[in-house]
Image (cartoon, grey):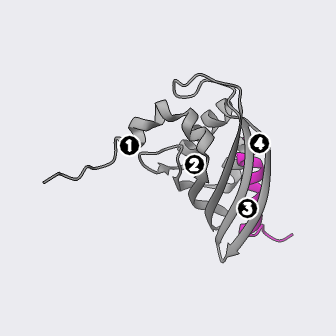
Amino acid sequence: MSSPTPRDIAETFIRDGLGKADAAVFDALIAADIVVETGLSPVEPIRGRDAYKAVFMEFAASWPVRDLTIHRIDVAGNTVMVEFTATAEFARDYYGVAATHQLVPMREIHRLDVSDGRIVRSVVAAVNLPFEFIMYPALKDAVLGQLQSVAKP
């Protein structure tokens, strides 16, 4: 039997690791020293599989995915781009924001770099305006507080 390709690894991770919040998929497909750039950690990248899994599982407990559709997968060597949409329910309070039980659409592109059968780097780009507006009270200081100001003359 052949080893899974970077495409296989990326698709399984998105569909089952993220879509189904399957912690075993994180353990199987994510490198121990992964670096993840995502809005779930707006101040700095997440470093390490255990940290990534903890951050994502906390998110998934509050925002469980009801459906996920992969629209496109592009592969360039060991780099895989996966574009998908998901619908999540805001089911449990998250970072002090009260759950609304609204169904929220999320559109994302994940760039996943694969080495030796594991994802070693992930960069997440998203158009998740409903999520961002709902979470604004918790995110505004973390995101906007990091911006520098230009001194006025």
Task: Report the residue marked by disc 1.
Answer: 144
Q: Left or right of 44: which side holds 65? A: right
Sooner in the amino-acid sequence: mark 3 or mark 4: 3
Q: Please, which residue is most extreme toward the bottom here?
A: 77
Of the residues under marks 2 and 4, which one precedes in the sequence? 4
What type is the residue that disc 1 sits on? Leu
- Between label 2 and label 4, give the one nearer the viewer: 4
- The answer to whether 48 appears left or right of 143 in the picture is right
**Residue at 77% in and 56% down:** 12
Q: Residue at x 75, y 70 (%)?
A: 5
- Residue 111 in view (yes/no): yes
- Residue 13 visible in the shown view: no
Distance between the alpha carbons at the discs numbered 3 and 4 = 15 Å
Residue at numbered disc 2: 49
Position of residue 145 measured from the top left corner of the image (x, y, whole percent): 34, 41
Precedes in sequence: disc 1 or disc 3: 3
The Cα–Cα distance between marks 1 and 4, rounded to whole angstroms, is 31 Å
Instruction: Report which residue position mark 4 lands on.
Output: 20
Overall secondary structure of the magenta stretch?
Answer: helix
Name the residue that disc number 3 marks: 9
| For discs 1 and 3, the disc positioned in front in the rendered view | 1
